[in-house]
Image (tube, grey):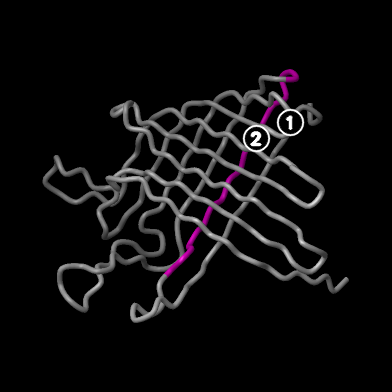
Amino acid sequence: DQEKMNWTNTYKFAFGQARISEGGLRKTDDKIDLESILTYKLNQYVNPYAGLTFKSQFAPGYKYNTPVAGQDLKVSKFFDPAYLTQSVGAGWQPMTEVKTRLGFALRETFSNSHGYADDPKTGKTETSKVEGGIEFVTDIECKIADNILFTSKLELFSPFKTIDRVDIRCDNKLTMTVNKYITAILAVQVLNVNPFPRTQIKEVIAVGFTYNVF
């Protein structure tokens, strides 16, 4: 029954750089985020789903201020790392503004030269790995006022082998339309993904200009 099937495809691409005094140009944003979700509308609240997501980046990333003066350590590049996740489970929409889902997931990690897929317990360097685990995702899109929109996405993944270790990705954005030409954005991103040992937080305040030709 096509009326009960809902196939949603979303994509997010972002890339930005900023000149930081003597440090030169450095990346401020770099994202490839694709998602495809097929949902069967079983009833008003609980709906089975199958999902596929892909995450990576465009340009190399560096660790700055390394012990060797004048040298920056390259820690990532295009498709290194890259994450492909397939999941099945049940979705729940308690209200129009909130959608959440919980399911079993299979996450594949690809890394050619930076070790994100490597298992230190083996005697060789792996370039890919597969992890089974539990996925939890919540999307919020709430119109606070006629000119203010709040969006948030929380993504959690916990592998079965290390169930107490939870990878966290959380993107929050407040978009304020000043007038038909000017938009102000406040964004906060929280990231804690293995193998990084600590939580990373990024805050962005931006002003954009829009103009409709037609």
Mark closest to the chain's N terminus, 1 or 2: 1
Q: Which quadrant of the figure contains the C terminus?
A: bottom right
> Which residue is under mark 1?
5
Is residue 30 covered in magenta? yes
> Which residue is under mark 2?
38
How far across and down, in percent of the image, does residue 56 sit? 45, 56
Q: CA distance from mark 1 to mark 2?
A: 7 Å
148 vs 168, nearest the viewer: 148
Residue depicted at x 74% and y 50% = 148
- Is 181 drawn above or below residue 12 in the view shown? below
Residue depicted at x 71% and y 34% = 97
Residue 167, numbered circle: none
Q: Is residue 214 left or right of residue 108?
A: right
The residue carrying pointer 1 sits among few (fewer than 14), some (14 to 19) or many (20 or more) residues within 10 Å by Cα, namely some
Residue depicted at x 40% and y 76% = 20
37 vs 140, nearest the viewer: 140
User: Magenta region's main secondary structure?
Assistant: strand
Q: Is residue 1 left or right of residue 113?
A: right
How far across and down, in percent of the image, does residue 200 sit? 38, 50
Looking at this rendering, what residue extends furthest in the left direction?
123
